[in-house]
Amino acid sequence: MKYIKTFLNIILFCFLLSSIIIALFMSRTPQSAIAWLISLITVPYFSIPMFWLLSCPNFCGYLIKKNSLHIKKFKNTFTINCNVQVVEKLSSMPLTQSNFVKLLINGYITFKSMFDGIKRAKKYILIQFFIIKNDKIGQELKNSLIYSAKKGVNIFVIYDQIGSHNLSKSFIKEFKKAGINLFKFGFCKGWKNLLKINFCNHRKLILIDGKEAWIGGLNIGNEYLGINKQIGYWRDTHLHIIGPSVLCLQEIFLEDWFWSTDTKIHNLNWKPILSNIKKKHIIVVPSGPINNRNNASLLIQNSINIAKQRFWITSPYFIPDQSVIDSLKLAALRGVDVKIIIPERTDHLFVYLSTFSYFSELIRVGVKFYKYIKGFLHQKVMLIDNHTASVGTINLDNRSFRLNFEITAYIIDGDFAKDVKYMLQQDLLYCNLIHLNEINCRSLINKLLSKSAFLASPIQ
């Protein structure tokens, strides 16, 4: 028995030592490295398995497969300013012009637009969601797709294996029985990814015939209609896009499909449709854990840094990295109107507690935080001055910055920015401004819980 105990202690020490070395070399930030080192040393029995499950900074193999897909890219042929060039380089996608974009506010409007679009499909439908539920909305999606499949439309669906883990076998079977190509975006693919359960594909896309697309914050489920009594009213934003940027979204879908299935989709439309009305410039910005560049964080930092009059942003979570914090401070100090809208309610208590630790230092320099009190705010929207706005899937947290596959439509257009400004002004009518004394007057227990949660924010 003594020898067994000694042997187990040796194994524990080896795992602890290797974990510490990996944490030192592989952590993307000093804060993350310190958080892991403290956890590993103080509670090794719990932290070692969690480290091996959650800590890997990159997702192996995706970039190699992406580069092997050899999708023919198209480029813009017009002059753009340096700020837009930065976003182009981040995204590896061109700025496209002549796009029609419509804001879709909340679930009923969005789902009607999506399902009407599915009915218009003639050749193919590409669909990708983080969450697909087998409820009323999920059934409506399924029935719409089965009806389209019977008309001869080719349908390809990707769902995330973590977000849609409750999807029943019978639900999946009905899809496949109808001839619909349905696959999960799995992260345990390949021996290097066996333990990588911490990554998610958080993208939400519908593409019809290479002509029109839907992108934004809504998944497929009843709660996005705001009819779940526990969650309440659900505030979200989606986009309906017609134009050349749809082909950029199509390219991103194909990369995810190729990873999931090892197969290519042929006979797709690659001829851009040009909108004759409300022509808008769009850059599609994908991000994810396939390299160390942190596109999501850099996109937000660049947006803050170029703002001269206004930077407004909404997110269900607020646990940004230090670079974003510093950019927000600098923007406020140079006189930019910085507004951050977050929900009063939360669906993740630990994340909610962490958020309080950021308020004081930002409020003191002039950043304004607003709590949305009408329901749960889930939209991911940015507004920069009077010329640029974005809608997508990126949350203001380290998971979105470093672990999730995300996507954003970055739209340079004064009229669209005006529409987004009006939309956010309407949201602000249902918000309460957070005051500094409100943060300082919290109970000691609340402050201790917030600071404890804050210590783990680099690895949340």
Image: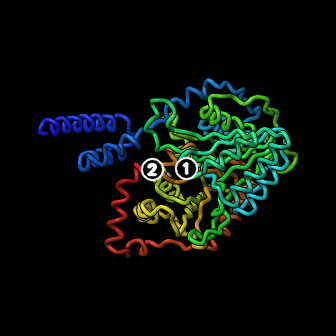
Front residue of 353 and 369 = 353
Q: Is residue 84 above or below residue 263?
A: below
Picture residue at 38% right of the left edge, 72% below the top? 440
* Mark closer to the observer (1, 2): 1
Marking on residue 279: none
| x then y, percent, for residue 451 | 34, 62
Give the image's coloring scheme.
rainbow
For residue 24, say whether it is visible.
yes
Q: CA distance from mark 1 to mark 2?
A: 29 Å
Picture residue at 56% right of the left edge, 26% below the top? 64
**Count of labels in the image:** 2
N-terminal-most mark, 1 or 2: 1
Q: Is residue 107 left or right of residue 33?
A: right
Q: Is residue 198 above or below residue 140?
A: above
For residue 309, say whether it is visible.
no
Picture residue at 49% right of the left edge, 71% below the top? 434
| x then y, percent, for residue 291 | 50, 34
Residue lying farthest to the right in this orientation: 276
Q: Is the N terminus in the top left, top right, bottom left or bottom right quadrant?
A: top left
Q: Is residue 57 above or below residue 232?
A: above
Secondary element at image label 1: loop
Q: Which residue is mark 2?
A: 321
Front residue of 125 and 104 = 125
Residue lying farthest to the left in this orientation: 2
Query: Which amino acid is tagged 1?
Result: His
Q: Which residue is mark 1?
A: 165
| x then y, percent, for residue 117 | 81, 50
| x then y, percent, for residue 322 | 43, 50
Query: Which amino acid is tagged 2?
Result: Asp
Secondary element at image label 2: loop
Picture residue at 37% right of the left edge, 64% below the top? 450
Instruction: Say few, some or many: other residues with alpha carbon within 10 Å of mark 1 (under 14 / 14 to 19 / 20 or more).
Output: few
